[in-house]
Structures are given as structure tokens and as C-alpha cells.
Image (tube, rainbow, N blue to C red):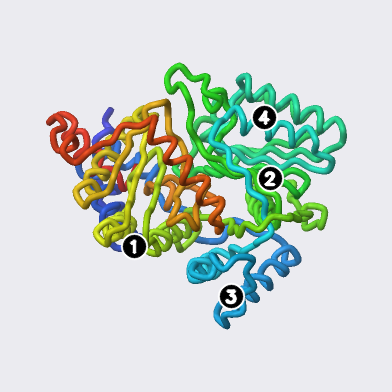
Amino acid sequence: MIFFPYVLSVILILNVLLALAIIFLERRDASSTWAWLMVLLFIPIAGFFLYLVFGRKLSKKEIFTWDKKSRLGLLTAVQDQLRSIKDHTLKVYHEDIVPYEDLIYMQLKNNDALLTQNNEVEIFTDGQKKFHALLEDLEQAQEHIHLLYYIVRDDRLGQRLADVLVRKAEQNVEVKLLYDDMGSRKLGRKYIRKIEEAGGMVESFFPPLIPKLNMKINYRNHRKLAIIDGKIGYIGGFNIGDEYLGYSKRFGYWRDTHVRLVGGAVNNMQTRFILDWNHASRDDIFYDERYFQADGEGDVGVQIVSSGPDSDWEQIKNGYIKMIMSAKEYVYIQTPYFIPDDSLLDAMRIAVLSGVDVRIMIPNKPDHPFVYWATYSNIGELLKAGATVYIYQKGFLHAKTLVVDGNIASVGTANIDVRSFRLNFEVNAFLYHPKIAHVLSDRFHEDITDSTELTFTLYKNRSTWVKFKEAIARLLSPIL
């Protein structure tokens, strides 16, 4: 006990030094800096340890690397597309793409997001239909199965998936399953061993060096990708678990959005998977043409855009802002969480004040109450400007979709929140085609029938207790 005062003094000194480092050395935005300083000030000892786990910034060094041969073709194609956009010689399947060449250029420049235009796209908003299609495609796999999910559960759906993967591995199909260590923390060794004993490979992203003590817990691979034989790809919001089929007593029906792709975009999804896999596994995937067999007869333009804390740019958020600022008629947004930073909130507010019909749909049933109240606080800002807000009542809304003017859309894994833009590893499909945009727009209107409108009058009349929870949540939202 005699050493306790000295230990306490050392921690308090470290607390002060850490605060100074946050202010002068780390390039954080002002809101995040103030939030962490308040944590360190008001709970100095606990705040110090909270920062070690949740506050440290990930190294900006490139953590996703691949051999030069695999990158050469991609980078050459990206440079060719950049030149063609600048020279106004980009060959497009539809003239509807032309007004968005600046958006395409930005995603190419900042993310190597190659535009492919030969894609067939199928949209799923119901878990039963999505997983029926996915499991059917997996059963037909002949060469390889590559899966990446934030959450994999050992429940009925998880076992159905495992059974398929075991069968295909026993048929000498290459099976690789990558999951996030935090999101799938309840996944047991028995589940993993079942797949591995059949010949498949299973890896976790950012596993702890010491069991139960993960210093990278704040950086999560939130991506959901499935690539079958290099020809079929799935991307969107559904994870692997019974709740995504609507079996959860807590949430009931699960409303999400997922996309099935056939076409050149699958090659770009494959690249994303391989980069993630090679970081997580010692058994690297090397370039092989058999992984890149995507060929489609569709006419949908697609860019696969990734973002993460290893990047200097918030690529998906920037894509959202560019889409919103291009809007002339309407912007439809569906998101489970609504905690935008000032830049994105300003873009939405400007769109509303410019006469654009901005509609936002959020869930009534929160899966994270603290984030839920931060969402309500931010929603008030747009209600005041004149946006329309709907509260989805049928179940839990988990979709991450953005539709603009019936021409372009985005579907993927990124929520409208600081965590998705700065801390999580995310991936979205940016879709350029009126047909797809209209399908998503129609689904939005269908969901309105299962929603109630939150008017500005109703919002202003909320209770003092609700206002208090919103204020606290909003104050700490930069570090959520």
C-alpha cells in the first residue's frame, strides 16, 4: 500500500502528458480532441486506460499489402480511367453516368476504385431471401469460396453456413472464412475446428495478443463480403446470425439491404478480400488468374470503395458528401445510426435549404442505446432545416443505403456515424444506374408505410429526460 500514492502520481503525470500529446501531436478534429480531454479530466485514472484501449490512433503505415503483380493491372487500369475522365473520353454504357464523372474520378483518385460497367445487380432487403440465395450459390461453388463477415454466430444460420463450407471443403473447394475478432467474440473453437478439419481455413481480424485483452478493440473490420469462384459477389449489411433472419425476440423483423453482383465489380471485391485475408493470415493468397474470373452481361456501373483507420482520407464519407451535393431532386438515406460529422451534416443541411427533398429513415428499436440518443440529437438539426425523418416501426432497420435523384446509389457496410468513417474498416458499392436507384427508391417508399414521421413539433416536445440523454450522447459522440 505504501507504493500506491507513487503509482497514482505516475498515472496522473502520464494522464497530463497524454492530454498534451492529444492536443499537440495527434492530428484529431477539435470535437474528438475535446471529448477525450474531458474524459481524461473528469475520470483521470480510468480515462487513461480507456484511451489506451479505445483512443489510440492506428498507425498510418499501409497494413494491407500485396505482391506487385496483382496490383500492376489494377493501378494501370485506374490511371487509364483517370485520364479518360479528364479527356472526356470515358466510354459509358449509359449517358446517365456522365453527370457523375467527378464522383467517379474522386473514388478512383483516392481509393483506386475502378469503375466497371458490365454488372448484373440483384437487391435483397429480406434476410430469408438473401441467405437462401447465398447458400444456394455456395452449394454451386466449384473452385473457391471467400467469406468475410463482421459477425459470425454459432446458431442455426451459422450452422447452416458451416455445413455448406464443410461439404465444399471436402469436395476440394478452397474455403476461406475471415471474421472480426470483436464482432464474433462469442464464436467458439468448436465451430472453427469443424471447418478446418474438413480442409477449410478460418482466420480472425485483429485477434488479441493476450486472450481477453485486445488493444485494437476499437478498430473493427465491419466489412461483409462473399465471393464465389471469382464470379459472384455479395456486399451489404447482413451478418451471419439468426437475428438477421428475423428470429430475434428483441428486434423482431430485421430490415437490411444487401447486393448480389455478377460482373467486373466482383474482381474488385476479390482484391479487397485478399488484402484483408493476407493481413490476418500467415497463409497469404498470391496472385492467380483463377481468382479473377468475373464477367457479366449487365449494364450497371459499380465502384467498390473501401475505407478504414489506416487511410488518410475518409473515402466513403467523401463519396456520401459528393452524392448529396450533386442532388437536384431528392436524397433518401437509411441508416441504423445517424452521427455525422460537421462536413456531412452541413452537406445535408445545404441540400435541404437548396430545395432538395432530403428524407432520412432510422430505427425505432436501438441496438446501442447510447448511440441511439446521439442519433436523435443529430436528427433534430436536420428537422430544423426542413428535412423529413421517418422512424421505422416494423422491426430493426440496419440498412446502409443512400439514393440520389433516381440515378445513383450506395449500398454497403458503412453507417452514417463517426465510427464507420474513421475507426472501422468498411466497404460500399457505389451504383450508377437509374434502374437500381429506382428499385432502392421504391423500397424506401414501401418502408415509409411501416414507419411514423418524426416532425419538428414532436421533436421539440420531447421530455427533459430525453433532452438530457441526447446532450450527453452528443457530447461524447466523437469517441463512440
Q: Nearer the viewer, mark 4 or mark 2?
A: 4
- Asked which secondary structure carries label 4, the reply is helix
Q: Kindly report which numbered mark, 2 or 3, lies closer to the viewer in this rendering.
A: 3
Mark 3, secondary structure of its residue: helix
Residue that appears at 52% across and 19% down: 247
Mark in the foreground, 1 or 3? 3
Determine which residue is flagged by label 2: 281
Q: CA distance from mark 2 to mark 3?
A: 33 Å
The residue that disc 4 covers is: 132
**Residue 338: image location, x then y, percent:** 34, 43
Q: Position of residue 128 (x, y in %)?
A: 60, 27
Q: Which residue is mark 3?
A: 82
* 473 w.r.t. 318: above or below: above
The three-letter code of the residue at mark 2 reads Ser
Mark pair 1, 4: CA separation = 50 Å
* Mark in the foreground, 1 or 2: 2
Of callouts 2 and 3, which one flags the residue occurring earlier in the amino acid sequence?
3
Q: Pick whichever, 377 or 86, lies toward us.
A: 86
Alpha carbon of mark 1 to alpha carbon of mark 2: how far? 33 Å
The three-letter code of the residue at mark 4 reads His
Quick one: 436 or 130, which is closer to the camera?
Answer: 436
Structural crowding at the residue carrying mark 1, measured as other residues with C-alpha within 10 Å and reported as few (<14), some (14–19) or many (≥20): few
Residue plotted at (35% across, 62% down) = 27
Distance Cα–Cα, label 4 vs label 2: 29 Å
Q: Nearer the viewer, mark 1 or mark 4?
A: 4
Q: Earlier in the sequence, mark 1 or mark 2?
A: 1
Number of other residues with Cα within 10 Å of mark 2, as a class: few under 14, some 14 to 19, many 20 or more: some
Give the camera-side residue of 146 and 183.
146
Residue holding disc 1: 25
